[in-house]
Amino acid sequence: MATLRVQEANLLVIVASLNSPLLTLFLSCKELNRFLALELNLVIAAPISSSIAALGAGPQWKRKICNRTIVTFALTFLTSSQAILIVWSKRAGKYEYSVTTANFLVETLKCFLSLAALARTWKNEGVTEDNRLSTTINEVSVYPIPAALYLVKNLLQYYIFAYVDAPGYQILKNLNIISTGVLYRMILKRKLSEIQWAAFILLCAGCTTAQLNPSSDHVLQTPFQGWMMAIVMALLSGFAGVYTEAIMKKRPSRNINVQNFWLYVFGMAFNAVAILIQDFDAVMNKGFFHGYSFVTVLMILNHALSGLAVSMVMKYADNIVKVYSTSVAMLLTAVVAVFLFGFHLSLAFFLGTTVVSVSVYLHSAGKPPR
């Protein structure tokens, strides 16, 4: 009980630092606060503890652990609000703005933020071999592949809502958990233990169970197009994530903002082509920002910060951490929905979150020996 109170207090401090009245409100509920404290402790504290043991007593381990903690919390928080903002940006059930221009602005903002961070590094540390922006053809030639994959995946993220509702989207999104695990093994040649494979299956079952409610039962009758889009999104998300992690860690000393800059430059280029192909007439006749609202701007900002958080997770942790952070964010989204949409927490929700907690623990404890 004492441990729960400490976790409860720590969690409220974290939320207060985020300056979010909504989250502070729902965390004031004692039972939910205790539940989320346990959930976040399992998904973040346990992996961090094992990371400390793995890193040893080197001079930089504290900074690495701090980086992992911050980006994991940030990614969880940003992802939990991502689907809600996409739905809110629609008017009368459709997007009045061009989704290709929105994606272009996301890539542009990420590129600008990476440059700003890089400029700060140059000011403090000077220009070095690892943080200089100039590069070679061999180094930069690997970035178009993940940039193109993310382009298609991000566009599908908007269009899939034509076939499923938000709960259905959350359920189908779990398909990328398995694809990430398989591709992680195939591409990076990382061995996953039998316990970790079992943890993947439990995670899928837990997240699905947590999201089930009477309004989402019809996900089983999702049109064929919706299922195909979900499967394609899962494969694209898994392959792009694992491939990007391989790029980031191929040269670990390379400044992450330089790596991000080149990835986002290609992302801007591909999204510009998408605008020309798909929305050129609409942009020319109605304007680039036609149909934009305050919620649209928030959504773009959210996507940009989420992308940066994902890249940092891949640099300082791994793509598996991203998957688990995203999965916990799904559960947080359901809790926030209690106050936004009057969503009623069901027995299935609490059972699902329990399964997810066990899955996270098994993944951390089941790492194969090096």
Image (cartoon, rainbow, N blue to C red):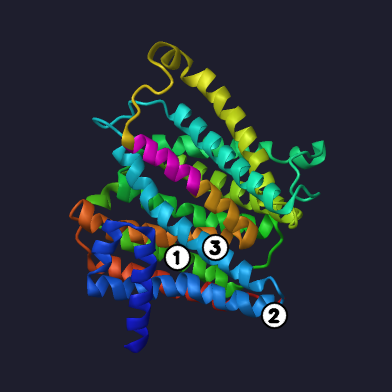
Task: Give the image quarter of residue 297.
Answer: top left
Q: In the image shown, does 122 or 292 lie closer to the viewer?
A: 122
> Sequence order check: which comes first, mark 3 or mark 2?
2
Verify whether residue 298 appears in magenta: yes
Question: Seen in the image, is 284 located left or right of residue 52?
Answer: left
The residue that label 1 is drawn on is 203
The residue that label 2 is drawn on is 57
Q: Categorize mark 3 by other alpha carbons within 10 Å: few (<14), some (14-19), many (20+).
A: some
Q: CA distance from mark 3 to mark 2?
A: 22 Å
Label 1, secondary structure: give it. helix
SS at mark 2? loop
Quadrant that contains the C terminus: bottom right
Q: Is residue 345 left or right of residue 184?
A: left
In x, y percent, where is residue 44? Answer: 49, 70
**Residue 15 in view (yes/no):** yes
On the image, numbered disc 3 is attached to which residue?
Answer: 321
Residue at x 64%, y 57% (from the top left corner): 315
Residue 46 image position (x, y, % from top left): 51, 76
Which residue is outermost to the bottom? Answer: 2
Q: Nearer the viewer, mark 1 or mark 2?
A: 2
C-alpha distance separating marks 1 and 2 = 32 Å
The amino acid type found where label 1 is placed reads Leu
**Mark 2, other Cα within 10 Å: few <14 / some 14–19 / many ≥20:** few
Closer to the N terminus: mark 1 or mark 2? 2
Amino acid type of disc 2?
A: Ala
- Residue 250, image x and y in percent? 75, 54
Name which residue lies at 27% across and 57% down.
21
In the image, the segment drawn in magenta is 295-305
* Sequence order check, earlier mark of 1 and 3: 1
